[in-house]
Amino acid sequence: MIQQVLADGYADGRLDRAEYDERSDRTVAARTLGELPAIVDDLVSTSLTPTRSGLARATAEDIHRRAVAAWRADVREATIGFLVPSIICVVIWSLVMWGGFFWPGFVMLGTGINLVRVAVRRSELVASHERRLEKKRAKELGQPWTPNDKASE
């Protein structure tokens, strides 16, 4: 980990070759973990802790784009949730009861309702995803969130 920080600092031009070699030697020679932070403290930013989702710097447009992407993922999940059971049931029906009562229609109806619901309620679901992302963004920034807040640019 320390070697990676040093390598990144060298690649970014924050360290010259001699300083990189000297710090690498100090890293190898370190006998305790307490010695390591002093070697890289000027290379690691401590002003902002990194966030996993990266929403702290997101604009309203970024949040909207992520919300639409989440809705598209919902549509894919609903489509797969419709197709997989429907295909399995139709295959079983065709192998066992060809020409008999088409019972897979009930499965297709039940799973199809969810697919239609997700596809038709696009604006509601996108707005819901936006609210969730804005709330997460406010939490990352350490700010209180209210439903009327909008992501600032």
Image: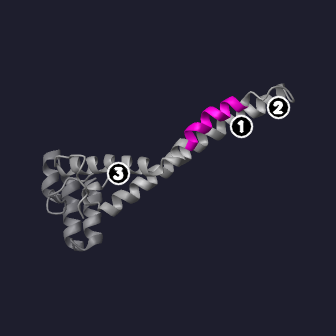
- Say whether residue 63 is left or right of residue 5: right
Which residue type does callout 3 highlight? Glu
Residue 152 is drawn in which quadrant? Answer: bottom left
Callout 2 touching callout 3 (CB < 8 Å):
no
Taking depth in this image into account, of 50 and 18 the one nearest to the observer is 50
Q: Quadrant of the C terminus?
A: bottom left
Residue carrying label 2: 94
Residue 131 appears in view: yes
SS at badge 2: helix
Looking at the rendered structure, which numbered label has been put on residue 130? 3
How far apart marks 2 and 3 lie (CA) works out to: 44 Å
Callout 1 touching callout 2 (CB < 8 Å):
no
Establish if 54 lies above or below 104: below
- Say whether residue 42 is left or right of residue 112: left
Answer with mark 2 or mark 3, whichever residue precedes in sequence.
Answer: 2
Answer with mark 1 or mark 2, whichever residue precedes in sequence.
Answer: 1
Q: Residues within 10 Å of mark 1 (few under 14, many from 20)?
A: some
Which residue type does callout 1 highlight? Ile
Establish if 152 lies above or below 84: below
- Say whether residue 20 is left or right of residue 91: left
Which range of residues does the magenta coloring cover?
105-116
**Is residue 69 inside the magenta stretch?**
no
Taking depth in this image into account, of 87 and 148 the one nearest to the observer is 148
Q: Nearer the viewer, mark 2 or mark 3?
A: 3
Residue 33 is drawn in which quadrant? Answer: top left
Q: Magenta-highlighted stretch: main secondary structure?
A: helix
Establish if 118 lies above or below 54: above
Residue carrying label 1: 87
Q: Residues within 10 Å of mark 2 (few under 14, many from 20)?
A: some
Which residue type does callout 2 highlight? Ser
Q: Position of residue 85 (x, y in %)?
A: 66, 34
